[in-house]
Each structure stands twice: as structure tokens, then as C-alpha cells.
Image: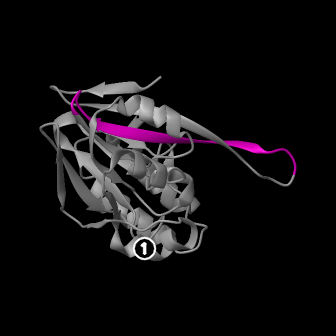
């Protein structure tokens, strides 16, 4: 069931979706958080993955202002084309992630995301923060009126997202987290692309530990 983070009239719903992914032995289950920011009339869908039916049930007939991708990896966008087709909403991605996107996702974005850009929905602002490191065009989405930031795979509970991948860089993701996320109010809720939520204050205490361990 969607799990709400409430504000005035707007709210943030979470839909946890699952997929079976191949491995050398037993197939593994991969989960993703799909976030929906809006109210009972309109919504923005962030990182639609794996389960189209569950996502459409959560949208529940609301007007979809946009479908936003925090980064270009396909496991956070596996049903993005279907959601866009079902809703008619534009798909937005940071232009620095186009190369990552085109390598695996068989559709093209309709528009770019840029640092400082504001996407309005249900009377609240979604502010785009460019936070490269996991990918060159990774972004986080700060919703100040709801006291939350959607971090994709830039910041998870327990540390930075993975950087042992093509196009990724550990020093860059640390700089992004330090300069753009840890400067937010400590009680800001961190809503990541997978796993449980946390807060900026809880994660900030471990920055030196992450740097020392190198991941």
C-alpha cells in the first residue's frame, strides 16, 4: 500500500515495487521506491519502476503533471514509457544523463531538468538539485513545504549510492551530498530510490565515516 508523507493539502506517497533480476545462482528480488508528490487532484510521479498496475492504482486517476527521473538507470525507469503513455505526462531527465539513459531505456525524455528548476504541483514546489556522482545527471528533488527531499540513489539510508559503475565517481557523489543535501535542515526527511527513509541529520553524522571507507 502507498505510504503517505503528509503536509498541508499535498502529500508524498510511496509505492514499493519489486522485480526478479538474474544472478549466477538464484534470481534475486530487487525493490524500488516510486514516489508520488501531489494531492487528490494532481501528482508528479518520480522514478516509476517494475509494477505498472501498482503505480496506476496509486495515481488513481489524478492528473499527472510530469514523470520525473532522478537518474538514467533502467531499474528506476522500467515502466516509465508505459506510465507516460497511460497518462500523457511529459518525461523529465537531467541532460547530463542522456547518454546513460539511451544505453538502456527505449524512449526519449520530453524535457530537461536543471539546477534550481522548480516544478509546481498541488501548491508545493519541487526544487531540482543537480547531485552528480551516481550518474553525471543525477538529481535530488527538494520539497521544502513538505520537509522532504527525494534522493534517488544519491543518498540512501546508511550512505551514498553506488559508485562502482560506469559514469559514477565517489568523490563527486560525496561533494554532491556535502554541498547540496547536508546543508538542508537536519529534520528534512530523506526519501531514497530504494530502502527505508532517513533524515538529513541522521546521515550527516556519518559523512567522515563514508569518506574513510570509500563507499
- In the image, farthest residue toward the top: 1
Residue 108 is inside the magenta segment: no
Q: Nearer the viewer, residue 176 or 140?
A: 140
Residue 30 placement, left or right of 206 = right
Q: How many marks?
A: 1
Image quadrant of residue 103?
A: bottom right
Query: Residue at point 50% right, 32% down?
Result: 54
Residue 210 at what x, y percent from top left? 50, 56
Note whether 108 is above or below 16 in the view shown: below
- Residue 169 visible to the viewer: no
Query: Residue at point 52% right, 75% down?
Result: 167
Image quadrant of residue 191?
A: top left
Residue 197 at what x, y percent from top left? 43, 35
Residue 144 at what x, y percent from top left? 18, 42
Note whether 205 is above or below 196 in the view shown: below
Residue 28 at what x, y percent from top left? 74, 44
Query: Residue at point 43% right, 49% down?
Result: 47
- Residue 97 visible to the viewer: yes
* Quadrant into which the C terminus falls: bottom right
Residue 120 placement, left or right of 56 = left
Note whether 50 is above or below 136 in the view shown: above
**Local secondary structure at mark 1:** helix
Q: Nearer the viewer, residue 190 or 112?
A: 112
Crowding near the residue tagged with mark 1, few <14, some 14–19, many ≥20 C-alpha atoms within 10 Å: some
Q: What range is drawn magenta here? A: 25-41
Image quadrant of residue 132?
A: bottom left
- Give the residue pinned by disc 1: 98
Colouring used for the render: one colour
Residue 36 is inside the magenta segment: yes
Amino acid at each position: 500500500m502507498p505510504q503517505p508523507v503528509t503536509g498541508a493539502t499535498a502529500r508524498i506517497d510511496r509505492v514499493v515495487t519489486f522485480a526478479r533480476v538474474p544472478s549466477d545462482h538464484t534470481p534475486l528480488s530487487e525493490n524500488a521506491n516510486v514516489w508520488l508528490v501531489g494531492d487528490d487532484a494532481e501528482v508528479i510521479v518520480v522514478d516509476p519502476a517494475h509494477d505498472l498496475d501498482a503505480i496506476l492504482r496509486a495515481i488513481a486517476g489524478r492528473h499527472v503533471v510530469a514523470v520525473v527521473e532522478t537518474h538514467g538507470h533502467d531499474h528506476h525507469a522500467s515502466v516509465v514509457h508505459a506510465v507516460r503513455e497511460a497518462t500523457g505526462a511529459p518525461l523529465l531527465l537531467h541532460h547530463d544523463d542522456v547518454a546513460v539513459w539511451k544505453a538502456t531505456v527505449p524512449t526519449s525524455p520530453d524535457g530537461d531538468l536543471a539546477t534550481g528548476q522548480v516544478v509546481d504541483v498541488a501548491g508545493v514546489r519541487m526544487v531540482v538539485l543537480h547531485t552528480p556522482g551516481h550518474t553525471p545527471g543525477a538529481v535530488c528533488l527538494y520539497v521544502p513545504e513538505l520537509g522532504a527531499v527525494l534522493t534517488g540513489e544519491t543518498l540512501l539510508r546508511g550512505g551514498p549510492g553506488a559508485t562502482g559503475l560506469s559514469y559514477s565517481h565517489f568523490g563527486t557523489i560525496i561533494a554532491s551530498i556535502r554541498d547540496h543535501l547536508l546543508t538542508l535542515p537536519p529534520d528534512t526527511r530523506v526519501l531514497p530510490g530504494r530502502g527505508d527513509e532517513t533524515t538529513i541529520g541522521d546521515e550527516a553524522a556519518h559523512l567522515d565515516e563514508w569518506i574513510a571507507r570509500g563507499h
